[in-house]
Amino acid sequence: MTIKDRILNIKKEDYFKKSNLHIHTNFSDGEADFDAQIEKAHELGLLNISITDHNTVEGYRHSKYKDDEILIKGIEFDCIQDLCYIHILGYGIDIENEQLNKLCSKRNVKCDTGLKRLLNLRNAKKVIEAIHNAGGIAVLAHPCCYWALSLEILTKRLISYGLDGMEVYYPYDGFRGVIKFHSRKIPRKIAEKYNLIQTGGLDNHKELYY
Ligand SMILES: [Zn+2]
Ligand SMILES: [Zn+2]
């Protein structure tokens, strides 16, 4: 099954109890151990998870779970597009892909503060191309959080670069105090209009829980 089909097979109601495609670990700014997140996901009976640390796939290299059946290999890149700071998720990537690795942080990502990350933004077009080159699909993360006058115009630009999907199942309410610039209904409407793959995740930075 292709990564696109696997994600399309996840039912809307499976987010987040059975599927969570946005999880961080202490390989970036999360608190939990990479392998402990996978073990916890099994314990909770999750069927699909993706660990999407910021700008790195190092966690996958160090993990003892190389090809876990519930795990979709992922990453979350810091990007800039039209003066807007955005996050693009890559799913189903080959972590050894050269083009993708060139865009990963060279330093120890754990030490990257918010400011350091802001000073090291990637070109969104290059990120989408690299994710495709690595066999993955590119998904716009938590779209309500972007300071774009029009989320639709931003999305259309990203689609012209090959964007495949949009994260529409996301806990916007009360999540980490992140400011929301767009109503939560808008991403789903845009995703439907442009036929984007609709994904979802909790963006956990702590240990998984339910
Ligand atoms: Zn993010
Ligand atoms: Zn995230």
Image (cartoon, grey):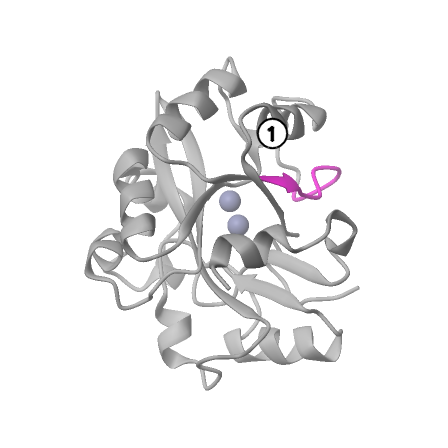
From the viewer's perspective, is 201 left or right of 155? right
Q: Position of residue 6 (x, y in %)?
A: 57, 59
Q: For this rendering, which residue is in front, 184 or 133?
A: 133
Residue drawn 47% across the image and 79% down it: 67
Q: Which residue is mark 1?
A: 144
Q: Nearer the viewer, residue 206 or 201?
A: 201
Estimate how packed mark 1 is, as few (under 14), some (14 to 19) or many (20 or more) residues with alpha carbons within 10 Å. Answer: many
Mark yes or no: residue 171 visible: yes
Does the magenta segment cover residue 172? yes
From the viewer's perspective, is 55 left or right of 130?
right
The picture places residue 52, in percent across and down from the top left corner, at: 48, 58
The amino acid type of the residue labelled 1 equals: Cys
Which quarter of the picture shows residue 49? bottom right
Query: Where 103 sits versus 170, above or below?
Result: below
Quick one: quadrant of the C terminus? bottom right
Region rendered in magenta = 167-176
Q: Magenta region's main secondary structure?
A: loop
Secondary structure under the numbered disc 1 in the rendered image: helix
**Ligand 1: does it lie within 8 Å of the C-beta at label 1?**
no
Residue at 31%, 64% (x, y): give it. Answer: 108
The residue at 77%/60% (across/down) is: 17
